Amino acid sequence: MFTPDDTIVAVATPPGRGSVGVVRISGPRAIALAGVLLDRTEDLTPRHATLGRIVDDGQGATPSGIDQVVATFFPLPGSYTGEDVVELSAHGSPVLLDRIVSLVLVHGGRLAEPGEFTLRAFLNGRLDLLQAEAVADLVDAVTPLQARVAFDQLEGTMTGRIAEADRELLDLIARLEASLDFPDEGYHFIESGEVVRAVGKIVARVRALLSGASTGRLIREGCQVVILGKPNVGKSTLFNYLVGSNRAIVAPEAGTTRDFITEVIDLDGLAVTLIDTAGLRTAEGNVEAEGVSRARQASGVAAAVIVVLDQSQALEAQDRAVLEETTTTPRVVVFNKVDRPLNWLSESLLLGQQGVSVGVSALTGDGAGRLREKLREVLVGADALRDTPMVANTRHIDLLERAAAALEDAQRAAKRVAAEEFVLADLDRARIALEELTGKRTPDDVLRHIFERFCIGK
Ligand SMILES: Nc1nc2c(ncn2[C@@H]2O[C@H](COP(=O)(O)OP(=O)(O)OP(=O)(O)O)[C@@H](O)[C@H]2O)c(=O)[nH]1
Ligand SMILES: [Mg+2]
């Protein structure tokens, strides 16, 4: 994976048909390889769109033109990868694009690994590791909020914050080392009280980054919400309403849904995988019993559950059982079918249970807006999505936690007026964690793991 001497090629646009498909070539021979394919001999002008014809040289047989393309040459070091890059925008036919890639391979190019273009950008210092990871997140985003968090990271917001902390840390380390280097003078370049204060400032910076992390993670990774309830209360109807399509079968018989059905919805920027399940009851057949067991499993890993009750029917033991089963899970209790005459007073049920509840008609959509609000509240709190959090990735959270812990150790050591060596050892650990974060020193296996996530051509 780490062989920057060869020239790599891949289709950069998604698989399938489109009006345009882009083949990307990067490396020392990018221009030469493009020259072999294109029928024009004059040099491509840097950063100018040039119309050309791709000629299949037929490898011995008769050469023939296969497409008209727009070729753009991005010279090093200002290109995406930091190498010479040529992008060929052809017509978006998979066979055609595959043929263009094969021609590049025949003439000495190599097929790019997933993420290899971005890896090269990272190795050539065009992006740091946080920004490279942001590229993958941006491509993967399914909600606009996910895209915004990723783009902030790509623009270097987090990189900047880490750099501030890192600068202060290096400055402190330099002063402590100076004290160590001149022990005989009996002079301390920095007093222990000052060390404690300086470390405190850096810890605060790191902790501030971490403060929005759990919301950030939820935004980046999304979460699962399971709809539970006894049969026939309207779970699938509610699911369809929230998803915005007739995805799940709705029927007046109890026991309609057997397996579980999932769809991703955008809940104010949170990518929520909504799961419709089989009604919870003592099942009548094997298939339904399996459905009930799957419903229970799904609710076990869910970030929250929606418990659906039918307000137009008398509350039954099965309803109470579902409520009891979910008391410890974050949940919203839905009183469904409010369009019908009410059979019991839902408020009295929840009195003293502090449940988040909402009256809804899954049939008409009445109350669905409030349900979405309550669900968001249960998942991230009332105002959590007001500011875009900066930290959203588990790798980042772990390393920032590690840095914060090492800094706090350093602070304690400095308070005990321990020798500079001890404080320095702790500060070094913090620095290593920060450098691993930005990719200044990240183990190869971690890098490999990060870039494997990318698609080919990115
Ligand atoms: N009037 C009214 N009828 C509803 C409402 N929600 C669902 N129904 C009806 O209730 C019946 C059962 O709805 P489903 O959505 O299939 O119920 P379910 O909970 O998924 O049922 P199972 O899959 O069998 O567990 C259907 O006839 C729906 O049309 C509602 O808000 N108002
Ligand atoms: Mg159903």
Image: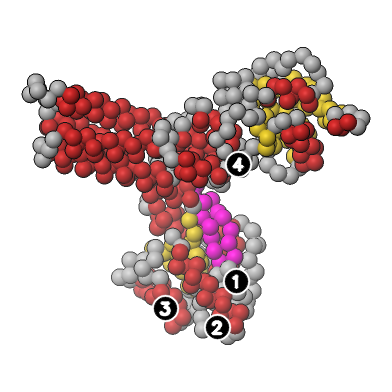
Disc 3 residue type? Arg
Residue, disc 4: 114
Disc 4 residue type? Pro
- C-alpha gap between disc 1 and disc 3: 23 Å
- C-alpha gap between disc 2 and disc 4: 47 Å
Highlighted magenta segment, given as a residue range: 261-276
The foreground one among 275 and 373 is 275
Q: Residues within 10 Å of mark 4 (few under 14, many from 20)?
A: some
- Looking at the rendered structure, the secondary structure element under dot 2 is loop
Q: Which disc, if any, is residue 320?
A: 3
Instruction: Reply above or below: 250 against 158.
Output: below
Dot 2 beta carbon under 8 Å from ligand 1: no
Q: Earlier in the sequence, mark 4 or mark 1?
A: 4
- Tags 4 and 3 in contact by the CB under 8 Å rule? no
The foreground one among 339 and 394 is 394
- C-alpha gap between disc 4 and disc 1: 35 Å
- C-alpha gap between disc 2 and disc 3: 17 Å
Residue, disc 1: 259
The picture places residue 159, in percent across and down from the top left corner, at 41, 32
Whether 267 is among the magenta residues is yes
Q: Determine which quarter of the picture holds residue 94.
A: top right
The picture places residue 42, in percent across and down from the top left corner, at 77, 14
Q: Nearer the viewer, mark 1 or mark 3?
A: 1
Residue, disc 2: 283
